[in-house]
Image (cartoon, helix red, strand yellow):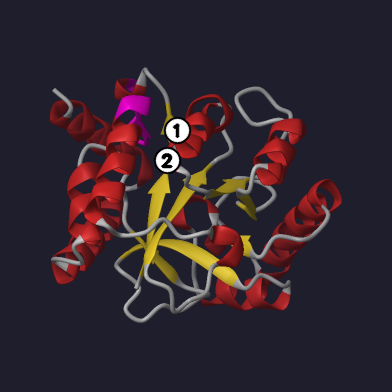
Amino acid sequence: MPIFLVYHKIRDDAAQDAHAISPHLLQEHLQAIRASGVPFLEPREFQPAQNGVVITFDDGTPDHDTNVRPLLDKFGARAIFFVSTDQLDTAGHLTRAQVKALQREGHVIGSHSHVHKRLDLMSPEQVREQLATSAAVLADLLGAPPAHLAPPRGGYDATVRAVAAETGYTFCRTMRWGYNRPLDPLAIEIAPVTGAWGTWFLHEALRARNERLVKTLFFLKLGLRDSLGPLDYRKIRNTVAKLARG
């Protein structure tokens, strides 16, 4: 049972962003994983039948190089970093040189599409263009096309799955919550460890507990987002996150 953890920004001013946590909290999470006895899985050699933790980071922000990389080295862990290729070398994102350095150190670089927009709102042709462009950019940069895809903003549906397979991706990490029992390589479930309740989700996932509750909370979240609309939902989410952090 592979547990996929999703992180976003790791920075000291995390209280200003519902998707961010501090480097100190990430270190606590890594310590908790080690103490649990659940192994860190090697993403370069990942097989669907393996048991352990796969660590992933979305959005390709500079803190993944400055804050995350040293902590992963400290624990001997390797991760998958999902980058949107049109953001490389732009303000607030990783440079091509940093991405290449992460790969040299044993981390995996995955596609977060070419532009950071929801794929499930695009036509099949647009999805194909996004995934093919991203794969071509990463192949040119790193020497091989990516095997891993994480659709931006959790924008995943049957069309995204089919086009991902057609364009050569063998793994698709969604934002659907769960413990991958069993694992579907093109619909990988995650534990949402970024945010106010991330530590609770982490400990439940490491013990493989309360998966039904975790899945129920996910569908409640979707219902709330759909009923409120994205803007109001983000306002409520950010407010709850700030209250939870004190």
Secondary structure at numbered mark 2: helix
Image quarter hosting the C terminus: top left
Of the residues shown, which amino acid type is indicated by label 2?
Phe
Residue 20 magenta-drawn? yes
Across and down, in percent, residue 145 comes to: 76, 61
Q: Residue at x 42, y 23 (%)?
A: 11
Image quarter hosting the N terminus: bottom left
Of the residues shown, which amino acid type is indicated by label 1?
Leu
Q: In this rendering, is residue 171 above or below 21?
A: below
For the residues labelled 1 and 2, the Cα–Cα distance comes to 7 Å
Kindly identify which residue carries mark 2: 75
Across and down, in percent, residue 123 comes to: 65, 67
User: Which stretch appears magenta?
Assistant: 16-24
Residue at the top extreme? 13
> Foreground: 69 or 178?
69
Judged left or right of residue 153, residue 105 is: right
Residue 71 has which mark? 1
| Marks 1 and 2 close (CB-CB < 8 Å) | yes
Residue 1 magenta-drawn? no
Residue 148 shows in the view: yes
Across and down, in percent, residue 60 comes to: 59, 38
Q: In this rendering, is residue 2 above or below 217?
A: below
Q: Residue at x 34, y 31 (%)?
A: 21
Across and down, in percent, residue 89 comes to: 74, 29
